[in-house]
Image: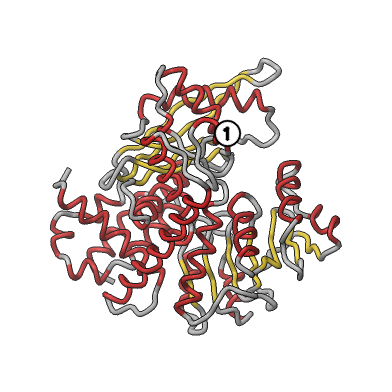
Amino acid sequence: MNAYIESVISNVRAKHTSEPEFVQTVEEVLSSLSPVIDAHPEYEKADLLNRIVEPERMFTFRVVWMDDNGAYHTNTGYRCQFNGAIGPYKGGLRFQKNVYPGIIKFLGFEQIFKNALTGLPIGGGKGGSDFDPAGKSAAEVMRFCQSFMTALYRYIGPDIDVPAGDMGVGGREIGYLYGQYRRLKGVWENGVLTGKGLSYGGSLIRPEATGYGAVYYLQEVLKHEGDTIEGKRLAISGYGNVGWGIMKKAAQLGAKVTYFAGPDGYIHDPDGVTGEKLDFILKMRAEDPMHCKPYADKYGVEFVPGAKCWGVKDVDIYMPAATQNDVKMESAVKIAQSGVKYYIEVANMPTTNDALNYLRQQKHMIVAPSKAVNAGGVGVSALEMAQNSERLVWSAEEVDEQLHRMMENIHRVSAEAAEEYGLGYDLVAGANIAGFKKVATAMMEQGVF
């Protein structure tokens, strides 16, 4: 590894000992960049890497809200505006009780390169709170969102920072946040948030976009290998918007999800999640998002409690699509031993670094990284911004077509970047290099600050 990269990683490890997720993603990205740094000594001269791993700004704020019994509660809100070299900061808000600065930094750092890969002019950012919407009434969630936006609204805007949804922040939360923003600003800046409802500037297929884009990226990988998606069996984790989008698009293209995992265990449905089963999953997760066993009860299929589906042999493709660090070394070994060829990350950093490196070393496997595979979600968010600026609403077919082209391009530039630096068909390194080069060029052209 390049000595400059080693020194930057060492600095990050020392400085962020209590933020392992951030350290992990910095190591994963920078370790791919040795050939680029070797070819561009001007990056080291300008200390570009130490600059790019430091957020341009990050702030915390107090969020006080009242529950339905009249009691007050205090949570912490965060926004990390990590890098705006190629456009306004763009990235979701996550409301989960485990949110802390390390999670926000890791997500924001990943967002820089993911957004660059879309080819659209958007920088990287992330935010959220340690507030957990689960078990809260709609009125309690509304009051929290209003308090959160009251603290945040001064620092965001269509040309400054455009938040979106993430875990715990769906259409309901975005609506409450936007309503408070509009109330405070007194203007119709509907480009300030994405993931909005269709009645006030949202984009068609946005809920499914990340899952759809992941399947489109998978198609490109299969084409590269002289293969097709028809008849393929997929094992995924998660059945939220992303997992559901994978299920739906896979079924449309002649494949099927035969395994999916939830917090309580995993489902094995040999016939695949298709047709009315897709509608049932929407109902199931709305009523109880923590349990997928009702699916097995309804359709008479296998349910394995308290387990992941990593390592099953009767599938063709693995797609972890739930949360970070879902696949650790023990699971990676099972995946490799299963003989499956395609490992397509979808969630943000779903694989620990040691597990990811292990899978990349398996000669029979092709590994694709989440920052490329799941970029379709933020890509469609940027398309929503474009529609808002033009006061237009594109059809679902128009958005889907643009998403498909975007994912084809992300795969192409990632493969080309890896090939340019003699790395073969290394999609992990290629995505890191392609995203980094775009941001690095913009940073260098804008001078040192």
Q: Callout 1, which amino acid?
A: Phe
Q: Position of residue 256 (x, y in %)?
A: 67, 67
Q: Quadrant of residue 199?
A: top right
Identify residue for label 1: 131
Number of residues whose C-alpha sits closer than 10 Å to that of mark 1, classed few (under 14), some (14–19) or many (20 or more)? many
Q: Position of residue 66 (x, y in %)?
A: 61, 19
The answer, for residue 132, to whether it is visible in the render is yes
Question: Considering the image in quadrants, where does the N terminus appear?
Answer: bottom left
Q: Give the residue displayed 64% in from the left and 69% down from the top.
A: 255
Q: Quadrant of residue 10?
A: bottom left
In front here: 187 or 336? 187
The answer, for residue 375, to whether it is visible in the render is no
Q: Position of residue 426 (x, y in %)?
A: 39, 74
Q: Position of residue 448 (x, y in %)?
A: 15, 46
Q: Give the residue displayed 42% in from the left and 60% down from the top.
A: 405
In front here: 42 or 384? 384
**Would residue 449 be found to the left or right of residue 254 on screen?**
left
Question: Considering the image in quadrants, where does the C terminus appear?
Answer: top left
| Colouring style | secondary structure
Q: Is residue 144 above or below residue 397?
A: above
**Would residue 66 be found to the left or right of residue 191 on screen?**
right
**Would residue 62 be found to the left or right of residue 136 on screen?**
left
Local secondary structure at mark 1: loop
Q: Is residue 195 above or below residue 368?
A: above
Q: Quadrant of residue 322?
A: bottom right
Q: Give the residue displayed 18% in from the left and 70% down from the top.
A: 39
Q: Give the residue displayed 65% in from the left and 21% down from the top.
A: 67
Q: How many marks?
A: 1
In front here: 185 or 133? 185
